[in-house]
Amino acid sequence: MESPYVGILVNDKLHSRLPSGNTQYEAVDFYVEAAGEYGLTPCFFRIQDVKRDTFRVNAYVKENGRFVQKHIPLPAVIHNRAIYNGSAEYNELSSWVAGGTRLFNQWNRYGKLRVHELLMQNPDLRPHLPGTSAANTTNIGIMMKLYDKIIIKPDRSSIGRGVMLLQKIASGWKLTYPVSLSVRNKKKRHLRFRGPRLPALLVRRLKKMPYIVQQCLALATYRGRPFDLRVSVQRDGSGLWQVTGLVAKVAPKGSFLTNVAQGGTVHRLEDILAEEYPLLDGQLVYAQLCDFSLRVCRYLGEQLPHLADLGLDVGMTKDGYPLFVECNGKDQRYSLREAGLLDEWKASFFNPIAYSKYLLDSCVKEQIPQKPSMPPTRHHRQWKWGTKSNFQGSDVML
């Protein structure tokens, strides 16, 4: 019998590289390997490859060591690894779901302000959030009265593009800004002004796209440079949220950005704690960061539909207290590989396939009348320092 298909929705660039196998950071062979273990067949396609009238798709499938295109029914379960911004794409994906497809990470481009406002509704998470609001001249002026350092960043950009720093200096204020929004741009410039009137350059940028203004967090440092953590949090084969891996991202010298794409370097958290913070209990700090990340993802999973694979940027104070930075709906995952966490990196591709299997099995069970049963017992796995899958949630959402 032919293995059931599980769909991986990809963008144009990755789709064009599948035949050559040069897929760079997206290790598609891990999807193929994982699917083999779970009795599934992964197929890769774009949103435009789906025929709306027949709900069939032209998809790449790996056969005999190479990717070939096949014309198949739209898979019952799809993992979205593409990024879309328009309402047309949103409506198209929604139509698949309305037709019975289980599409997880259905929309992975939620604005930073919307995520912040959702998390602010949770009183347990609120103390971990930086002061944040929509960026306009009024709100920036208010923030300048409250804080000596504030961050201004595009509401929907990623990998540190377009982020600006506004900090108080003896003569007034200094704005540090990127020359362009290009992914490859790493050149920064500085503009000094007295205030309260904002520089014309900043005002122009605010008019071009939505920005948020945010309190600059007092992050812990490593060798004098601020760092935060990329935490990969995913649903696994049990349907539960779990922390797949965690890696520290350290800003380059003289920079406030920790993003790897902006020159940041990756390190294992335990190495940083041992060298820089020997008085902290490393296991406790690790546990607190993972527990906080799980609480964030559980809550967002209740508020936003079909979430199952997230990359959180989480900061910490010098005392190890977790701080929320932002949530990424498409975790790039490569920071785990760069830090030498190869098992965790591989697991970050295996878990979406395991979760797909879980959803497919749930589809079958829903079609078969089940006898009433006692509610499942909730439990928490034993935690061991330095291993993957250390922490699991106890909620299930389909």
Image (cartoon, rainbow, N blue to C red):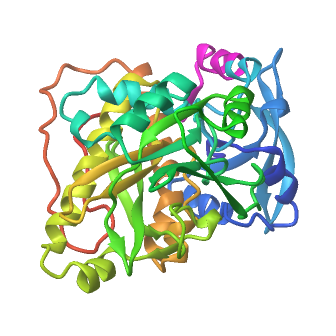
Q: Residue at x 44, y 73 (%)?
A: 343
Q: In terms of depth relative to the viewer, which is nearer, 57 or 272?
A: 272
Q: In terms of depth relative to the viewer, which is nearer, 249 or 197?
A: 197
Q: Residue at x 53, y 60 (%)?
A: 257
Task: Kindly tell me whether residue 306 is visible in this rendering.
Answer: no
- Which x, y percent locates residue 13? 83, 51
- Which x, y percent locates residue 248? 41, 69
Q: Give yes or no for residue 102 being in the magenta stretch.
A: yes
Left of 86 or right of it: where is 31?
left
Residue 94 position (above or below residue 398)? above
Q: Which residues fall within the magenta stretch? A: 91-105
- Which x, y percent locates residue 358? 42, 41
Q: In terms of depth relative to the viewer, which is nearer, 330 or 129?
A: 129
Quadrant in the picture for the C terminus: top left
Q: How many marks?
A: 0
Q: Give yes or no for residue 69 being in the magenta stretch.
A: no
Q: Residue at x 21, y 73 (%)?
A: 385
Task: Kindly tell me whether residue 198 is visible in this rendering.
Answer: yes
Left of 115 or right of it: where is 175?
right
Left of 324 or right of it: where is 101?
right
Q: Residue at x 25, y 48 (%)?
A: 292
- Which x, y percent locates residue 286? 23, 65
